[in-house]
Image (cartoon, rainbow, N blue to C red):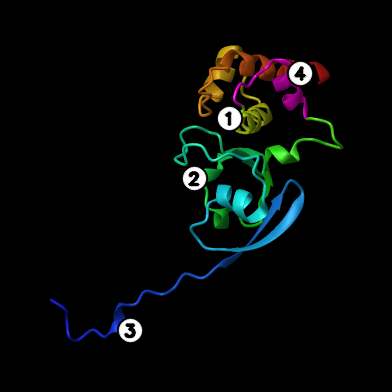
Amino acid sequence: MVNPDHSIADTEKPVPQAIPVTLQVNGIVHHLKILPWVTLLDALRDRIGLTGTKKGCDHGQCGACTVLVDGIRVNACLTLAIMKDGAAVTTVEGLETDGNLHALQQAFVKHDAFQCGYCTSGQILSALGLLNEGQARTKEEIRELMSGNLCRCGTYPNIVAAIQEVMQAKEGAT
């Protein structure tokens, strides 16, 4: 039964407003006006036009959407863009320098660490985050710390080999 004391105006919900958000993506500042529920993944792909970050499961279970936010790996599908206002975001498009692939990208190519390639950008960004964290020393530790990124094609041994090569080169340089 309808309550006669409520008018239509009382039951109308406020219309959400777009919120200004600033993201520094791959070194370029982007000023966006987005609705509060827009994920970082959708902001990157649909608003900024960087489609290298993939939408896989859209539930944070596959890692295809992994990007670095202020150097830390995050699942962009689970992160609201407004939560990262002012943050520096790195996507796979931001890894090459002057036309040269990042060492991880080169190692993935060298070790054939992809088959269909859909997960590759998330794998590479997660691997870069892993290297930044400095917690992995062994193949087993690499596997454990990369466990949030799934490869349905089964290239795990090649991915671990690529990461291990870059990790060893980095350790040899220090």
Q: Is residue 137 visible?
A: no
Contact check, label 2 and label 1, Cβ < 8 Å:
no
Q: Which mark is residue 171?
A: 4
Using the image, determine if residue 25 lies above or below residue 101.
Answer: below
Using the image, determine if residue 7 lies above or below residue 173.
Answer: below
Q: Which quarter of the rendered picture does the N terminus lie within? A: bottom left
- Report the residue marked by disc 2: 78
- Report the residue marked by disc 3: 9
Report helix, strand or loop for mark 2.
Answer: helix
Report helix, strand or loop for mark 4.
Answer: helix
Residue 161, percent across and down?
66, 14
Label 1 neighbour load within 10 Å: few <14, some 14-19, many 20+: many
Residue 77, percent across and down?
51, 44
- Report the residue marked by disc 1: 119
**In the orientation shown, which residue stands out farthest toward the front?**
116
Closer to the chain start, of discs 2 and 1, is: 2
Closer to the chain start, of discs 3 and 2, is: 3
Q: What residue type is disc 3 on?
A: Ala
Query: What is the magenta range?
Result: 102-116
Contact check, label 4 and label 3, Cβ < 8 Å:
no
Closer to the chain start, of discs 4 and 1, is: 1
Q: Which mark is residue 62?
A: none
Label 3 neighbour load within 10 Å: few <14, some 14-19, many 20+: few
